[in-house]
Image (tube, rainbow, N blue to C red):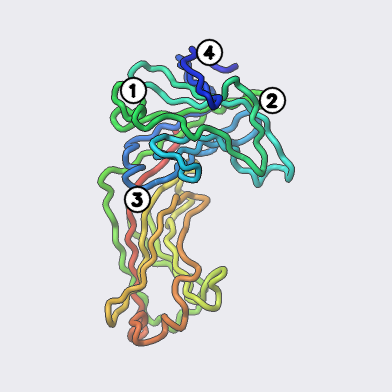
Amino acid sequence: MASPSTPVSTTQDGVARSISDAPPTHYVAKIQLFSLLLKNSVEKYESGDFEAGGYKWKLVLYPSGNKSKNMKEHISVYLEIADTESLYRNWEAHAIFRLFLLDQNKDNYLVVCDAPQKERRFRRLRNQWGFDQFLPLRTFNDVASGFLVDDTCVFGAEVFVTKEMSTGKGESLLMIKDATSSKHIWRIESFSTKQSECYDSQTFFSGDNKWKIQMYPKGKRHGLGSHISLYLALADPKAIPTSSKIFADFTLRVVDQVQGRHISGKASYWFSGSSPENGWAKYVTFSYFNLPSNGCLVKDVCVVEAEVTVLGVTNAI
């Protein structure tokens, strides 16, 4: 049964806001150092999956507003049905849902839902529903509101399909303040003799995790046969808990040993045990790499650098 709440307001666009003393039935997501999401230009945060009514769901949060909807000065929050590839081809799920935000001063929750509460039709063409203007950023950041205390906030969700099921799952996102970058230099000798499909660098630490550089001298996927492929990977993905994700900025660089005009690729990615690598299948063409004047290969030696900065980590709570 949905938790009781006290009505506060209903807007013209059919969104109701109320206060509830009871926590959300199905899921909570605690975000620590929230301001670093904005500082590090994290446009969208997706929670881990949780189960309700026989389906898997997740919260999707836009800390500075959903730019695809031209939202500004608001937090946008949505409920999305997850793991859709495991569902039947013509699946549909009708659900009533409510989204929560904890007032840490009063120990109660702001509840946002459709007014009146109505079923939303989740399907392959539209697997996400929610609120573009969940809450003004000015209100969210106001100390008196209690929504952001010590740079920490707590969102939640209730979802009711044909039957209710609560798993008690949740997660905590910790953004890392003053994150430091780790650099690793990989010197590959006798490059022309490399015949294996993939080569790994020695492991190195950034944050609390071990990483490695992966090079495919003959290319990988759509770079096979034409490009050298280069990736950053978690060295031991099996050691990462299923519910954990690591958000990192990284740069991979092939050093120009002649003129210093290095080849660099930079990206940001949520690494996890099920998605442990990210990089470029078409990092550099064979012709450019092998041209002596470009300095990528000198005396049959190639030098690759990685710079990794871990900015945030999610864990189960």
Give the CA distance from mark 1 to mark 4.
21 Å
In what element is the residue under mark 4?
Answer: loop
Numbered label attached to residue 251: none
Residue drawn where x is 32% and y is 50% of the image: 207
The residue at which mark 1 appears reads as 146
Mark 3 near mark 2, Cβ–Cβ under 8 Å? no
Q: Which tag, 1 or 2, sits closer to the chain's start?
A: 1
In what element is the residue under mark 1?
Answer: loop
Residue drawn where x is 37% and y is 84% of the image: 300
Q: Amino acid at mark 2?
A: Thr
Question: Dot 4, how many residues are within 10 Å of its Cα: few (below 14), some (14-19), or many (20+)?
Answer: few
The residue at which mark 4 appears reads as 4
Mark 1 near mark 4, Cβ–Cβ under 8 Å? no
- Quadrant for residue 171, please give it: top left
Q: Which tag, 3 or 4, sits closer to the chain's start?
A: 4
Question: Dot 2, how many residues are within 10 Å of its Cα: few (below 14), some (14-19), or many (20+)?
Answer: few
